[in-house]
Amino acid sequence: MLSILLALVSVTARPPISAAHPPPVVVVQRVISTPTVALLHGIAKLTPQEAVMKAADAAPHGVYGVFELAVRRAELVGTDFFLNSQDDYRDPRNLSVEIGPIAQEALRNRLGQDLDKALKGHTIRVLGYAHTVRIDFMSDGKPSGKYYFQTHVPVGSANQIELAD
């Protein structure tokens, strides 16, 4: 009796698929919140030191949170703009915020054309995912076998970054 009831529910729950009745199209949108909204919803706020340690502990995965850091170094490397929590980006305590080209453009529209001037020396909050990245030393265009790790927070949307000061 139960199997007949389940069969009836499954048949009546789905309309038949045909040219006249195609299956519904489901559109999934990714909603990117702001750091402030994330904090209001209980997402952890982490210092650069906490982010580096938690990302190392969670490797190869990482840690999600709102990262608050004073920007001590800012520079364009290739197509990505990096904000660093330390003057020396090789410092093991450094947290690097890696801003992609699309987010850079939106940030320039919001903060001004010179991102270095707009962000360096300020405290920012970044919503994202901190993970460790292996950086290989190169010799004649090939990895030398020597490497170190950095902790990066990739940013694909300008909404992920807010000025905190």
Image (cartoon, helix red, strand yellow):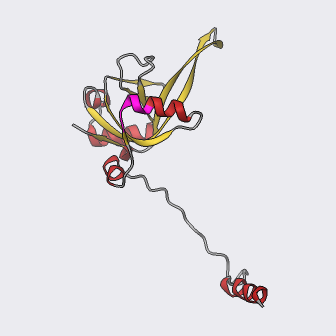
Residue 16 in picture, x, y percent from top left: 72, 83
Classify 148 as above or below 36.
above
In the rendered structure, the answer to whether residue 43 lies left or right of residue 12 reads left
State the residue lying farthest toward the bottom.
Answer: 1
Residue 80, can we see it? no
| Residue at the outermost top position | 140
Residue interval drawn in magenta: 46-51
Main secondary structure type of the part rendered in magenta: helix
**Relative height, residue 90 to residue 28 (above, below):** above
State the residue in front, 157 or 101.
157
Which residue is pictured at 47% across the width and 34% down the height? 54
* Residue appearing at x 44%, y 56% in the figure: 31
Tell me where residue 43 appears, x and y as whole percent: 39, 49
Residue 99: give x, y in percent of width and height: 43, 35
Residue drawn at 58 percent across, 16 percent down: 147
| Residue 95 on the magenta span | no
Name the quarter where the N terminus is drawn. Answer: bottom right
Residue 129, placed above or below residue 12: above
Residue 114: where, in percent of width, then height?
29, 30
Q: What is the quadrant of the C terminus in the image?
A: top left
Number of marks: 0
Residue 50 is covered by the magenta coloring: yes
Identify the image quadrant of residue 155. top left
68, 100: nearer the viewer: 68
Asked whether, in this view, residue 79 is left or right of residue 44, the answer is right
Residue placed most toward the observer, 102 or 129: 129
**Is any part of residue 19 visible from this angle?**
yes
Above or below, comparing residue 24 to residue 90 in the picture: below
Residue located at (36% from left, 55% from top):
41
